[in-house]
Amino acid sequence: MLIKRRSPIKSSEITPESVYVNRRRFLQGLAGTTALALTEGASAIPAYSLDKDQPQYPGPDWLQGALRDSVRNEAFSSDEKPAPYGNIITHNNFYEFGLGKQDPSRKAQGFKTDPWKVEIAGEVNKPGVYNLEDLLRPHALEERIYRLRCVEAWSMVIPWMGFPLGDLLKRFEPTSKAKYVEFTTLQDPEQMPGQRSFFSTLAWPYVEGLRMDEAMHPLTLLAVGLYGNALPPQNGAPFRLVVPWKYGFKSIKSIVKIRLVEDMPGTSWNRTASGEYGFYANVNPAVDHPRWSQATERRLPSSLFSPNIIDTQPFNGYADEVAGLYSGMDLQQWF
C-alpha cells in the first residue's frame, strides 16, 4: 500500500480560519502559577517522588523556574495512572542512539542539549534561528497526561510538560501557503552513535511532518519535560513533539528545525517503507501493520506473566477531539 503525495483534501479545507482563531485555553506569555491557576481546567501538579537511584534531569537553569511554575491542564489530560518513571526513561525508540529499547538510556547520557538552537523557516513572515530559551520564554508550561501508542503495539501513559505547538506557530505568522509543518531532528553522528551505525535503517536527519490543521490542534504539544523534570536525553531532550492520537514515531525528538511548507513533506519512515508507515499514522485498530495486528497493545508496565494486554482505541482514545480532522478521508488508504 503506497502513500500518495497529494492530500485528498482541498487546499481551502486544510487550514480553516477557525483553527487559527481557536480560543486559547491558557494565557500566553504569563509563566506564573497564579495566572494559570485562574484558567478553567488547571490544577496543581503533584509533587512527584522518584526513587533515589533513578537519574534526575533538572535541565538548564533557565528552564527550571518554568517547570516549577507549571500546572496541570485537566481539560487535556487522561485520568489514567502514568507509567512508572523508570519505564518511561528506559524503554525508548530513539534510533539515533541505537536500535535497542535500552540503547538510548545507555548511550545518550552525554548528549549536549544546552545551548540549543531551533530554526523557523519556510512559509512564515518571521523566519529566523532562535535560542531555545528565547523560543520558549513567551509560553506558559503546563502538564498534560497523554497516552502514547507505539506502532510496535506497546503503549504507556506519560505526564508531559510543555505548551501547544499552535501557540508557537502563530507567533511566526504562517502565510496562506503553509499547508504542512516539517520537523527535523539534530544530525550529529559524534553525539548520536546510531547515525553512524552500519545497521541504521533510516536516512539522517530524521524528518517528520503534520498537516497544518493537525499542527494547530490544541492537543498537539511541544514538550520540554516529564514527571516534573526536564526531558531526559533519551526521551527527546531538549524539545520534542507529542501528538497523542498518532503512532509514536510521529512525535519527533530533539527538534532543530521547524519548516512550514505548501506540499506534503517526505518523512523518514514513510520514505523508508511507505507500505508500512503512512504519512498520517493515526492510531487505527482496524488497519493492521503488514506484520502484526494493531487491534490490541501491551500497556507498560508489563511482564511475561502479567502482559497487560488492552484493546487499542481509534485515534488512541482521542476520537472525540480529532476525528473531525479526517472527515471524508478513507483511513484505509490515508493510514
Image: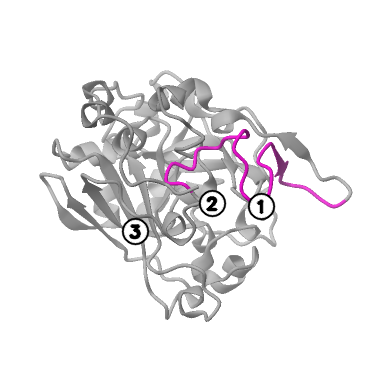
Work out which residue is located at the far right of the displayed protein and give it: 305
Q: Nearer the viewer, residue 91 or 113?
A: 91
Q: Which residue is mark 2?
A: 276
Amino acid under disc 2:
Glu
Q: Where is residue 306? Give x, y as percent.
A: 85, 45
* Tag 1 residue: 291
Q: CA distance from mark 2 to mark 3?
A: 21 Å
Q: Would you identify the image quadrant in which residue 157 lies? A: top right
Dot 1: element: loop
Q: Position of residue 32 (x, y in %)?
A: 35, 35
Q: Is residue 45 left or right of residue 211?
A: right
In this figure, which residue is indicated by the disc labeled 3?
A: 184
Q: Is residue 287 left or right of residue 240?
A: right
- Count of numbered labels shown in the rendering: 3
**Residue drawn 33% across and 47% down?**
5
Q: Secondary structure at mark 2?
A: loop
Instruction: Report helix, strand or loop for mark 3.
Output: strand
Answer whether residue 22 is magenta in the image.
no
- Residue range of the region highlighted in magenta in the rendering: 278-304
Neighbours of disc 1 within 10 Å: few (<14), some (14-19), many (20+)? few
